[in-house]
Amino acid sequence: MTLGCLAPYRRLGIGTVMLEHVLNICEKDGNIDNVFLHVQVNNEGAIKLYEKFGFKIVEENKNYYKRIEPADAYVLQKSFKEGSTDERKTASETSSEDTTDKIMS
């Protein structure tokens, strides 16, 4: 899903209303542990908005965007359930786990 607000309508509270709406739906669902999003590293206004809603930067992806500069993106996470964490694994983590599994077998 893409969520955005055209430049002439920014700083009017519209982004806040949209984000509140989406997060309320996620919270009411009851089956969603985490929400992730990406944002350009230089988009300070959006980052502050997301942090206000409890999102935390968990990763930086180099060269994420293909047609805009800067191309780097932050990945932010918001957890709905206490103790829920990012269960995604990096390639190196998966590789080392596979190696450990083979050694232990």
Image: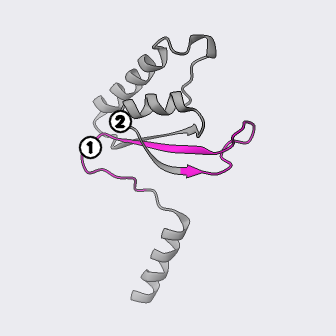
Residue that badge 2 annotates: 54
The residue nearer to you, when weighing 20 against 69, is 69
Q: Main secondary structure of the magenta part?
A: loop
User: In the image, what residue occupies the spot 49% across and 34% down?
Assistant: 47
Work out how far the residue at label 1 is from the one at label 2, CA to CA, in angstroms: 12 Å
| N-terminal label among 1 and 2 | 2
Q: Is residue 14 above or below residue 87?
A: above
- Could you tell me if residue 60 is visible in this image? yes
Secondary structure beneath label 2: loop
Q: In the picture, residue 67 is in which quadrant?
A: top right
**Total numbered badges shown on the rendered structure:** 2
Secondary structure beneath label 1: loop
Residue 49 as seen in the image, left or right of residue 92: left
Measured from the top left, where is residue 94 in percent x and y? 49, 69
Measured from the top left, where is residue 14 in percent x and y? 48, 14
Residue 64 as seen in the image, left or right of residue 91: right
The residue nearer to you, when weighing 25 against 79, is 79
Give the amino acid type for the residue marked by disc 1 in the picture: Lys
Give the amino acid type for the residue marked by disc 2 in the picture: Gly
Residue 3 as seen in the image, left or right of residue 66: left
Q: Is residue 79 above or below residue 17?
A: below
Residue that badge 1 annotates: 81
Task: Give the farthest residue toward the right.
Answer: 67
- Could you tell me if residue 105 is visible in this image? no
Magenta segment boundaries in residue numbering: 60-87
